[in-house]
Amino acid sequence: MTSAAVNRTVRELLELTAGYLDQKGVTSARLNAERLLADVLGLTRLELFCQHDRPVLAVEVARYRELVRRRAGGEPLQQILGETEFYGRPFKMEPGVFIPRPETERLVETCLKLLEPLRRGDRTPVAVEIGCGSGAIGVSLACELPRLQVHASDVNPAAVALMLRNARALGAGPRVHAIEGSRFDPLAASLRGQVDLLVSNPPYVRSADIAGLSVEVRDHDPVAALDGGPDGLKFYRAIASAMRDWLRPGGHVAVEIGDDQGVDVAAILAASGGLEVVVTQDYAGRDRVVTARVGEAEAADG
């Protein structure tokens, strides 16, 4: 976007910016242009649409140009805005914390179906999330299921703090517990054998593929949240080996996967005692979630 955009209307500025971002290889360039300008003007996108003929002041253009420059350079939109929408709710975002993807909503949907039999009953259902990031998964589950207790871990202290912040902002703070540490290590021993759902969107990119990722991902998502080891399956093996210790009989594990990992992850869970292993596709028809049950046939008790 050049200085020629100064003093243009909202409509003209959006058209100019969308073309510029498209040239820079930004996906959904028009949407990005709208979101950034709406943020600068303090408007919703709907309000922005209703003010297409509004002149944009020079000071607003200067601020907008800076945001557009950052986006064109590969900085994620969610990081620039400090917020993203996930499962119909606003989640605060911070640099250095993994940005949730829209396809991960499929994992949340799958988990809610698994937990539905526990919505009613005397016992408080318990979920454990390994690698919580911003809390998009665990907090969404807690918001959708008002009795659910969520215990989460992440090696990134910024992620742990952000999950707790998002949980408080969305009214689930008292039922969401996040602790810094690797995988199952920081979790209370009293949770062993008491967990109804073990959920994770673990790192699953092959180590050798990290360098070839887009700038937006490679330079802004933490490498620890991406690198799944030489074959991309390291964390699935760790989860599978621990699931029988943490899940109660009839409990479920649900993990997000890369779209070429369905067969391998299903085999890993089955080899560790997982029953009724199912691979679920996302809305683009790609393998996205693998689930399995541990122990007895009942999906619920109490």
Image (cartoon, rainbow, N blue to C red):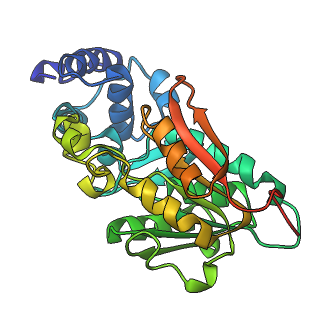
Q: Relative to residue 246, is residue 143 depicted above or below? A: above
Indicate left or right for 132 with 6 as reference. Answer: right
Q: Position of residue 22 (x, y in %)?
A: 24, 18
Q: Is residue 104 visible?
A: yes
Q: Residue at x 32, y 23 (%)?
A: 27
Q: Is residue 74 visible?
A: no
Indicate left or right for 2 with 50 as reference. Answer: left
Q: Residue at x 26, y 48 (%)?
A: 230
Q: Position of residue 274 (x, y in %)?
A: 63, 54
Q: Nearer the viewer, residue 131 or 74?
A: 131
Q: Position of residue 5 (x, y in %)?
A: 18, 20
What is the quadrant of residue 261 in the picture?
A: top left
Q: Residue at x 39, y 75 (%)?
A: 180
Q: Residue at x 81, y 56 (%)?
A: 297
What is the quadrant of residue 2 in the picture?
A: top left
How many marks are shown on the rendered structure? Answer: 0
